[in-house]
Amino acid sequence: MDLPGFWTFLLDVAVIFVFVMWFWLLITVLRDLFRRDDAGGFKKILWVILLIVAPFLGVFLYLLLQSKGMAIRNGQEVARTREQLREFIGQSPAQELEKLEALKASGAITSEEHAKLRARVIG
């Protein structure tokens, strides 16, 4: 089949796009497969063999059969990462000021301590 140059180019772009998407899906599936805690080693080996022997079929079968679990595991990972980031960064100055106001209102700190801590938080 002899296509004009432009259509050949579009076909090449489409083929490259499909390959890149499949490769991305393969990496995503392998990442999920090896991070799973609920699957034993034998089950992981079977999935890897299927992904090697029939790569397209293996990726699509994994997505079809394990998509809900993938979404749950991804959500848990995002939540863990978000919590680690919050622990690392700490609280915002506004949150610290709210805590200071609550401590002052409860009488846990004096006005002088409140002023000193407020100056430290602000800057």
Image (cartoon, grey):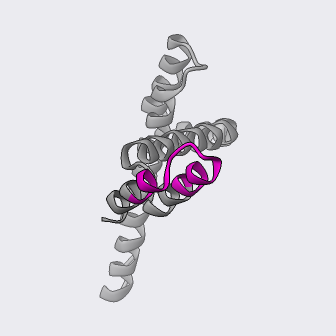
Q: Is residue 56 above or below residue 111?
A: above
Q: Is residue 8 left or right of residue 21?
A: left
Q: Is 17 or 15 nearer to us in this picture?
A: 17
Residue at 47%, 32% (x, y): give it: 51
Residue 101 within the segment the image draws in magenta: yes
| Image location of residue 44, percent across then percent down | 51, 20
Q: Quadrant of the C terminus?
A: bottom left
Indicate the quadrant containing the N terminus: top left, top right, bottom left or bottom right: bottom left
Which SS does the magenta portion mostly show? helix
Q: Could you say which is closer to the camera, residue 92 or residue 67?
A: 92
Q: Which residues are magenta?
A: 99-115
Identity of the residue drawn at 50% across and 42% down: 83
Question: Is residue 37 among what the camera can see?
Answer: yes
Residue name at image x 55 percent, y 52 percent: 99
Left or right, 74 with respect to 66, comes to left
Is residue 60 rendered to the left or right of residue 2? right
Residue 42 percent coordinates (x, y): 53, 11
Q: Position of residue 103 (x, y in %)?
A: 57, 48
User: Quick one: 3 or 98, which is closer to the camera?
Assistant: 98
Above or below residue 65? Residue 20 is below
Give the residue displayed 45% in from the left and 47% down from the top.
86
